[in-house]
Amino acid sequence: MNAPNPDPDPDKTPGLEPGGGVSPGDTPPDSGQTSGLSHREPRQSKKMSVAWLVAVIVIVALIAGFFLTYLIVYLTR
C-alpha cells in the first residue's frame, strides 16, 4: 500500500516560479500532515530497572568491601 505524497502538486500551487522556487518574500507551500494519532507506547517493565539497581548496589558493595578489607590489612601490619 502506497501512501499519497503529502507535498502539494507544483503544477497546481500558486506562487511557485519555474523550477519550484518561490518569489522573494513569499511563503513556500506547506506539506500536508502525515502523522496522526498512533498506538500508545507500551509501558516499560519495572523488572529491568529493579534488576539494574540491584546490580549496581551489589557492585558498589563489592568495591567497598575490597577497599575496606585492604584498609584493615594495611592497618593491622
Image: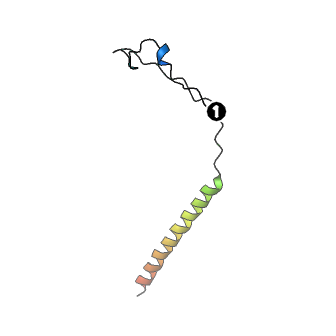
Residue 17 screen position, x and y as percent: 38, 15
Q: Quick one: quadrant of the C terminus?
A: bottom left
List x then y, in percent, for residue 58: 56, 68
Q: Secondary structure at mark 1?
A: loop
In the image, residue 31 above or below residue 69: above
Classify the position of the N terminus by image quarter. Answer: top right
Q: Quadrant of residue 72?
A: bottom left
Q: Quadrant of residue 76?
A: bottom left
Judging depth in this view, the residue of 66 and 18 nearest the camera is 18
Query: Residue 39 at x, y = what percent?
Result: 66, 36
Colour setting: rainbow
Identify the image quadrant of residue 55: bottom right
54 vs 44, nearest the viewer:
44
Q: Residue at x 53, y 69 (%)?
A: 61
Residue drawn at the location 48% of the way across and 76% of the way down:
66
- Residue bearing mark 1: 1
User: Residue 24 placed where, x, y %?
Assistant: 33, 15
